[in-house]
Image (spheres, rainbow, N blue to C red):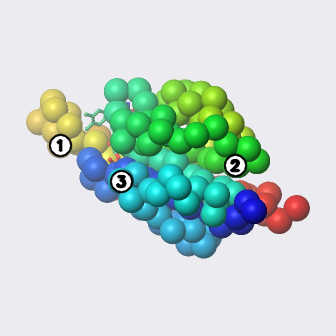
Amino acid sequence: MEGSKALIVCTSIHHKNTIKIANVIGNILVAEVIEPKDFSIENIDEYDLIGFGSGIYDGAHHKSILNLVNKINKQVDKKAFIFSTATVPVENFHKTLYKMLVEKGFEVIGHFCCKGFMDYHFTKYIFGGLNKGRPNDTDLKKAEEFAMKIKNSRKG
Ligand SMILES: Cc1cc2nc3c(=O)[nH]c(=O)nc-3n(C[C@H](O)[C@H](O)[C@H](O)COP(=O)(O)O)c2cc1C
């Protein structure tokens, strides 16, 4: 039987920006937050909803998330949502992951993205980094509202 738990899989390596979003959403959905390496594909049927998120790297989610989704078998009646932090937070960066999830049979029911601090490469030396302090309290509040919407959509 299909389970009714939610799970969140998150990679957050640059400044631990995205894990802040994952934890807020996880609290509201009562969902465990794990890294891709700790995901047991054989237990996937325990979950009816899985959130996938990371920082954006060169226009897409981190490869550990994409590699994980690649390994998942075709799913039936499984919902997913996508979240990210980025220098320029646009849903367009979710495209690669979105397409992969749809191909795997997931119904993608929501997207969340917000700014994340970035001081990679020249941005460190010229500006001392971009998006200082992000995600901030307002971003976390928006993540909470996003999670509430997802939670309410599961009730029906
Ligand atoms: C190597 C590298 C590549 C990145 N590429 C992009 C990018 O293509 N677009 C963007 O908006 N941000 C980009 N960023 C910024 C990160 O997405 C941003 O800092 C994010 O919040 C990192 O999340 P994390 O701390 O959870 O890993 C990049 C950062 C790094 C270090």
Which residue position is annotated with label 2? 79
Residues under labels 3 and 1: Cα distance?
Answer: 32 Å
Query: Badge 3 is on which residue?
Result: 37
Q: Which of 71 and 140 is in front in this view?
A: 71
Pick the quarter of the image with the C terminus: bottom right
Q: Nearer the viewer, residue 73 or 10?
A: 73
Percent position (x, y) of residue 88? 43, 34
User: How would you rate the neighbour count of disc 1 (Cα within 10 Å): few for under 14, some for 14-19, many for 20 or more?
Assistant: few
The residue at 22%/41% (across/down) is 119
Q: Is mark 1 on a helix, strand or loop?
A: loop
**Residue shown at 58% from the left, 56% from the top:** 44
Residue 141: where, in percent of width, then height? 56, 63
Say which amino acid is labelled 3: Lys
Which numbered mark, 2 or 3, is in the foreground of this view? 3
* Circle 1 residue: 128
Residue 118 tag number: none
Instruction: Give the residue type that dot 2 points to.
Output: Lys
Q: In this view, does 49 lie to the left or right of 13?
A: right
Q: Is residue 65 left or right of residue 98?
A: left
